[in-house]
Amino acid sequence: MRKILVTGALGQIGSELTRGLRERYGAANVIASSRRIKPGHEDLIESGVFEVVNVTDAQQLAETVRKYKINTIVNLAAVLSAVGEENPQRAWNVNMNGLYNVLEVAREENCAVFTPSSIAVFGLLTPKDNTPQDTIQRPNTIYGVTKVAGELLCDYYFHKYGVDTRGLRLPGLISYQTLPGGGTTDYAVHIYYEALKHKKYTSFIAQGTKMDMMYMPDAIDAFIQLLEADPNKLIHRNAFNVTAMSFAPEDIAASIKKIIPEFELDYAVDPVRQAIADSWPNSMDDSAAREQWGWEPKYDLDAMTKDMLAKLKARL
Ligand code: AKB
């Protein structure tokens, strides 16, 4: 039976993945953790065990793993692309030293490790369309640098120590429960909130900028599917390209207009986030994930828009 520790459990992915994991493995077997208790997450904190764990504190992390006899660590604690550029030293500390601590305790306590990577591992030299699984990775953000190094470090721990490491190269994730915390793809979440509240949105990403995206229910399925995948079939353990759709701001606006015809989009481009978006793929090739563990998303842009607006409306 899996006994799972989720780090960064109160973030955008963690708040939904923890619930998904508790449904599948039982609430008592999924320990949620975060570096601090954040208001608004009482449901999640009270629906199972919760611990304050800072991944940069190796001792606190190891004590928690031993206390609950953890055998799987899902490491979601990370500083994202846009906030990473504001404080690269903090991004390195959380993303790299945190991951190193996770891998070390996994090696000592015999745990599997699941750490997401990102489209941010690619850069200006990477082929932009149908970006291959194995290709040039020369990112120019600190977030991208830590994610490439993280993929390599996870591969190293698998080959050197036999730690069962797995991961996905996630695109921008769209969800209605918890807001994302400082990424470049966040506009694709904010646009839905503003569409419902004000029927207009000012995008910090320019017209024509395509990026890979995915609706959160598909991402949760992808996590659990890869966690459960037959290890003998996994050639790329730590860095599977996965995507569900690729769109630019005007495409998501057109999809929203089908449901809210008065919706209007304009632009006030943020040069920092635009430069990051310009360095990322337009669309990735995720055939390796499809072939090796059966990845198949359920939501396209219009299906996501319909569900997202309905769920968010009920919430707001
Ligand atoms: C970000 O925009 O930083 C993240 C990501 C694509 O990894 N959403």
Image: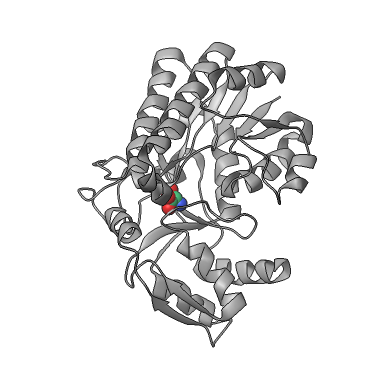
Q: Please determine whether, in this image, residue 254 is positioned above or below residue 105.
A: below
**Farthest bottom residue?**
262
Residue 249 figure quarter = bottom left
| Residue at x 37% of width, y 60% of height | 211
Q: Quadrant of the C terminus?
A: bottom right
Residue 136 horizontal/vertical position (percent)? 23, 41
Residue 277 horizontal/vertical position (percent)? 33, 57
Q: How many marks?
A: 0
Q: Please determine whether, in this image, residue 71 is positioned above or below residue 201.
A: above
| Residue at x 66% of width, y 21% of height | 64
| Residue at x 40% of width, y 79% of height | 266
As rendered, which of 241 and 267 lies closer to the eye?
267
Q: Quadrant of the N terminus?
A: top right
Residue 196 horizontal/vertical position (percent)? 61, 76
Q: Please determine whether, in this image, residue 195 is positioned above or below residue 229.
A: below
| Residue at x 51% of width, y 27% of height | 56
Residue 167 in view, yes or no: yes
As rendered, which of 247 and 100 lies closer to the eye?
100
**Farthest left residue?**
125
197 relative to 271 in the view: left or right: right
Residue 234 figure quarter = top left
Residue 237 in view, yes or no: no
> What is the basis of the colouring in this image?
one colour
Residue 20 horizontal/vertical position (percent)? 68, 44
298 relative to 177 in the view: left or right: left
